[in-house]
Image (cartoon, helix red, strand yellow):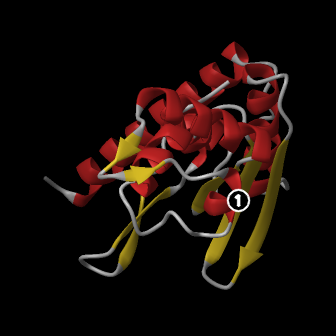
């Protein structure tokens, strides 16, 4: 393959991806398109807010972004509500790639969607739990198990003060919190 042939194949691939990005923008007029002079991170941050509000209208999310010497990041946090997996189904589309710890490098994987609606090097999700939410999970577990390995169910105070992290309840509580969505 000659240099000219490689160059032509690259140009065709680039044009196809630009065309796909334009099509996605037309199909999703509610999202903010990446435009000249607008950071891809800013567009992605706005779009994550739009999509989360549409998917989970009853819940409030904090969506912040920042730049740093190694790239940029978008951080999403909320209390109770949807599970991390449910939120990641939305936010994951805006990740620019992933860190390869075996080779100690970041591998970019941009695509037509990120070309159209933006991305950030790192997109993270952080879900907090209210006392009422934790108590509901503890009540569900108490109804399911009387004891685990001879240990009675912890109270909300036990959970909040770390007194159940070194017994069998810890795993059950963690799994139940992660799986319970609203």
Front residue of 43 and 3: 43
Q: Where is residue 173 drawn, in percent x and y?
A: 49, 47
Q: Quadrant of the C terminus?
A: top right
Q: Where is residue 153 drawn, in percent x and y?
A: 50, 47
Q: Where is residue 99 drawn, in percent x and y?
A: 40, 68
In the image, what residue occupies the spot 68% across and 46% down? 118
Question: Can residue 87 be seen by looking at this rendering?
Answer: no
Q: How many marks?
A: 1
Among all residues in the image, which is located at the extreme top?
27
Residue 95 lies left or right of residue 109; in this view the side is: right
Quarter-of-image position of residue 166 = bottom left
Front residue of 177 and 86: 177
User: Which residue in the structure is indicated by mark 1?
Assistant: 157
Q: In this view, does 119 lie above or below 57?
A: below
Question: Can residue 67 be seen by looking at this rendering?
Answer: yes
In the image, what residue occupies the spot 51% across and 35% down? 142
In the image, what residue occupies the spot 75% across and 31% down? 52
In the image, what residue occupies the spot 83% across and 50% down? 62
Q: Circle 1 sits in a helix, a strand or a loop, which is it?
A: helix
Q: Is residue 9 above or below residue 74?
A: above
Q: Where is residue 7 drawn, in percent x and y?
A: 34, 52
Quarter-of-image position of residue 48 = top right
């Amino acid at each position: 393959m000659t240099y000219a042939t490689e160059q032509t194949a690259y140009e065709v691939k680039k044009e196809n991806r630009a065309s796909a990005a334009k099509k996605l923008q037309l199909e999703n007029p509610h999202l903010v398109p990446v435009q000249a002079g607008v950071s891809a991170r800013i567009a992605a941050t706005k779009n994550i807010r739009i999509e989360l509000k549409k998917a989970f209208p009853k819940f409030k999310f904090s969506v912040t972004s920042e730049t740093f010497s190694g790239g940029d990041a978008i951080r999403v946090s909320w209390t109770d509500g949807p599970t991390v997996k449910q939120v990641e189904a939305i936010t994951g589309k805006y990740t620019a790639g992933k860190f390869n710890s075996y080779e100690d490098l970041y591998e970019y994987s941009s695509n037509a969607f990120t070309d159209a609606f933006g991305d950030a090097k790192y997109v993270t999700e952080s879900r907090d739990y209210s006392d009422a939410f934790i108590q509901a999970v503890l009540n569900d577990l108490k109804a399911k198990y009387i004891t685990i390995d001879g240990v009675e169910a912890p109270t909300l105070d036990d959970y909040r003060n770390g007194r159940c992290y070194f017994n069998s309840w810890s795993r059950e509580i963690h799994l139940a919190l992660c799986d319970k969505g609203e």
